[in-house]
Image (tube, rainbow, N blue to C red):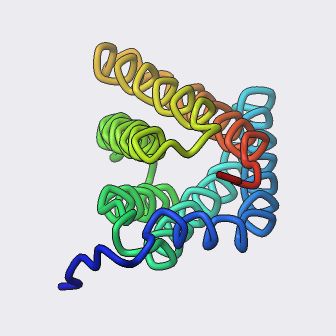
Amino acid sequence: MRWFDSDFDYVQEMIDAWNRGRKRMRTVYFILGALLLIAGILTAVFPIGIFAVIQYLAAAAVIGIGIYHFITFASMTYYFRDYMLIISGILNVLIGIMLLIMPIQLTVQVVTFMLAFLLIFNGAEKLSFASRLRYYRIPHAGALTFSGVLNIILAAVFLLLPFVSALALNYILCAYLVIMGIALLIEAAGMRKIEL
């Protein structure tokens, strides 16, 4: 455990770490967002013909997001670490593995509920982090809040309509990919250099 040092400026440490890695994170977010958006659109446009290909691409993208959550957690400063990232990363990797190896007929219901819980965890993590940023008077947390609310709304739809969701897994996957892609693009566009 790391003891609190009142002489050390933890907020400035977080701001410096953010400003150092902002461009790299922004680029990764734009690339992942674009890939998710493209995969989601292709899933909607070609639901039968290339579902297997899109399924593998979507699985790779979801696993990539999970790994990125682990990397993000490891690179955060101690007092700003959010352990929801670990849970979110694990859920992303599990969903990606399920999309890769299991036949869809067996996992339709499970994937629907896992996507819902994944979206709840992601939304809660984003809202929690945005709240912490506002608490420390760090600007530009609005895009993060919007992204968190968007994730929770989609999760509610998945949980309230699980059977309809299971029947329309292709379109659920499409909606998940498109919304996550848009959310990442919004977050990337909202990443600015922090100056206090």
From the image, which quarter does the N terminus lie in? Answer: bottom left
Residue 108 in sight here: no
176 versus 89 height, above or below: above
Identified at 59% across, 29% down, the residue is 142
Q: Locate residue 180, reporting x and y percent.
A: 61, 39
Q: Locate residue 62, reporting x and y percent.
A: 56, 56
Identified at 70% across, 53% down, the residue is 195
Q: 15 or 121, which is in the foreground?
A: 15
175 versus 92 height, above or below: above
Q: Residue furthest front?
A: 7
Q: Locate residue 120, reporting x and y percent.
A: 34, 36
Q: 3 or 50, which is in the foreground?
A: 3
25 versus 194 height, above or below: below
Q: 172 or 119, which is in the foreground?
A: 119
Q: Locate residue 123, reporting x and y percent.
A: 41, 36
Identified at 40% across, 41% down, the residue is 135
Residue 167 in sight here: yes
Q: How many labels does the image show?
A: 0
Q: 174 or 15, which is in the foreground?
A: 15
> Which image quadrant is residue 29 in?
bottom right
> Which image quadrant is residue 170 in?
top right
Q: In this view, does 185 lie to the left or right of 71?
A: right
Q: In this view, does 162 lie to the left or right of 30?
A: left
Identified at 49% across, 55% down, the residue is 99
